Amino acid sequence: MSDPAETTAPQADAAELRLVERLRAKDEAAFMEIVDAWGPSMLRLAKQFTPSTAVAEEVVQETWLAVLDGIDRFEGRSSLKTWVLRILVNRAKTRGTRERRTVPFASLAGHESEGDFHAVAADRFLTEDAKYPRHWGSPLPRWEAQPEQALESAETLTLIREAIDQLPPAQRTVILLRDIEGWDGPQVSNALDITETNQRVLLHRARSKVRAALEADFASAA
Amino acid sequence: MNDHTITDPLPELACQDFVEVVTDYLDGALSAVDQQRFEEHLAICERCVAYVEQIRVTIAVTGRAGVQGEALPAELRDGIRDAFRNWAG
């Protein structure tokens, strides 16, 4: 597993370092601003590891306290938000395991990357005895060139959130961190304590399912 | 249609295998040989070009699908603010 310091993800920029200075100076407005901005996604992330919303809320509160206690040690090698979320994930994982009502994340991650998986339904491809075996058997519905207004409409974003909610928990956690929070592979595998390969399999399955949901939606609308 | 199967440029990677390694490709995790195969396939297969584009669009749109317009439960927010005042006090 690679060192988190070697990640390609962005480091804290000048605006963030100023924010850190304000936190160190005990600026309540600055603190509440990031609590309000990041709190809801922290709660969503914490819920992936904990047995109840109540426990997830406790994890969020504990995380902010840990952030304040540790703010003098923040070195800016990752963005501030990434640093905060790493603390959250660590605490949520520990808490989830301690509650013993949730399956440890590593077992979920292993289980969810086993077995056959088809990014695209097998019947969309030609059979082995065809002239071009296992190549596309029918044209791919083309929805990707829709205008931005359609692709980024409230309906589409709701559809994506629903597709993500329906994923099994480890796949959901990985796509939240990679594609919503923008973490890179090493950051995710480190924080979740799974191998990079395992992380990528989970991401692959999650992304493929979200793509399929978009295809189904745009195809039925066409 | 001329059926010269021997000289037909059948790509080494079938589309069905191609779609399963797109994530590895985008992460730069394919071996040099596999990456070359992937790119060779991409150069001649329009449907797989479209597929990769769909995955890229999926990633981009997912990036905008974070929690939005939601607020923390008031009690939790108050608890966090109290913890801050304790810490700052």
Image: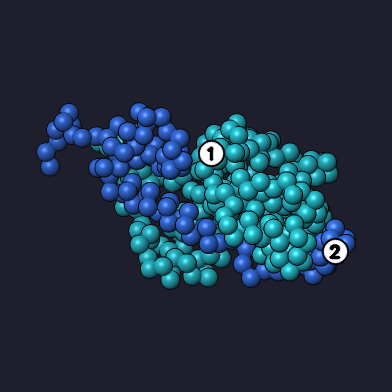
Residue under numbered circle 1: A201
**Do marks 1 and 2 both belong to one polypeptide chain?**
no
| In this picture, residue B61 sits left or right of residue A127 | right
Residue A158 appears in the rendering? yes
Position of the C terminus of chain A by quadrant: bottom left
Q: Residue at x 53, y 65 (%)?
A: A157
Task: Give, as a three-letter code, the residue at label 2.
Answer: Arg
> Where A151 falls versus A198 (above or below)?
below
**Residue A149, position as x, y percentages in the image:** 43, 71
The hue of chain A in the figure is: cyan
Q: Residues within 10 Å of mark 2 (few under 14, many from 20)?
A: few
Instruction: For mark 1, name the chain.
Output: A
Q: Residue at 85% of width from left, 58% of height from top? A: B87
| Point 83% across, 41% down: residue | A98
The residue lying at 81 percent from left, 65 percent from top is B81
Residues packed near mark 1 inside 10 Å, few (<14), some (14 to 19) or many (20 plus): many
Classify A207 as above or below A35.
Answer: above
Q: Nearer the viewer, mark 1 or mark 2?
A: 2
Q: Amino acid at mark 1?
A: Val
Secondary structure, mark 1, is: helix
Residue at mark 1 to residue at mark 2: CA–CA distance:
44 Å
- Residue designated by label 2: B85
Q: In x, y percent, where is residue A112?
A: 61, 39
Question: Mark 2: which secondary structure?
Answer: helix
Direction from residue A1 to residue A141 in the image, left or right:
left
In x, y percent, where is residue A147? Answer: 38, 68
Judge by depth and name the residue closer to the eye, B83 or A11.
A11
Return the residue nearer the eye: A11 or A4: A11
